[in-house]
Amino acid sequence: MVARKIELKQVGDPAKTRLRLWIRLLRASRFVEAEVRERLRCEFDVTLPRFDVMAALYRHPAGMKMSGLSRFLMVSNGNVTGIVDRLVKDGLVIRSQPDGDRRSWTIKLTNSGISAFETMANVHQVWINDLFKEISLEDAKMAEAILDTVVVGRQVRDD
């Protein structure tokens, strides 16, 4: 198979540069995500979605409603339900119904869940630091600020 360069007609240089940036962001993101998935699986026998659910719940010690958890993770309720079911079965999460609301559930990490997540999160931080070690602290802060402008700009346009 031969790679072919696509000619973008009637697109200025800034647009091409931004497109190349997008492609590089995707490539870097996919590389880091694949590496983290593999390390979580090998070291903790945990999937990345399970880690993400635990991370979200850890950030919300009072717990979260299932719908709020789905919104926070930007996935469907159905995707979260299966993960939460397994976390409950493993004793890492508890599910409770708020008084007077039989249709919604609040999800919260158990003490075992908190302990397990903290162990994984500390190791995860070391992995990420290692994967990004070639990026200076100054460049990391600049990249963070630049990427924030994409999200903030989108939120302003949506309002």
Image: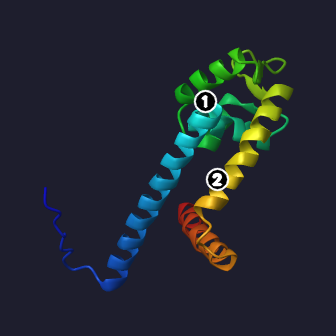
Q: Is residue 159 left or right of residue 14?
A: right
Residue plotted at (17% across, 63% down): 3
The reply to whether residue 63 is in sight is no
SS at circle 1: loop
Q: Is residue 105 above or below residue 74?
A: above
Residue, disc 2: 127
Quarter residue 98 falls in: top right
Q: Is residue 95 above or below residue 116?
A: above
Q: Amino acid at mark 2?
A: Trp
Residue 49: x and y in percent read 58, 36
Quarter residue 37 falls in: top right
Q: Is residue 1 above or below residue 4?
A: above
From this viewpoint, which residue is outermost toward the left? 1
Q: Is residue 122 left or right of residue 74?
A: right
User: 104 or 17, which is in the foreground?
Assistant: 17
Q: Amino acid at mark 1?
A: Asp
Residue 16: x and y in percent read 32, 77
Residue 152: x and y in percent read 61, 66
The local crowd at label 1, few if under 14, some if 14 to 19, many if 20 or more residues have their Cα within 10 Å, is few
Quarter residue 42 falls in: top right
SS at circle 2: helix
User: 109 or 37, which is in the foreground?
Assistant: 37
The disc at residue 45 is 1
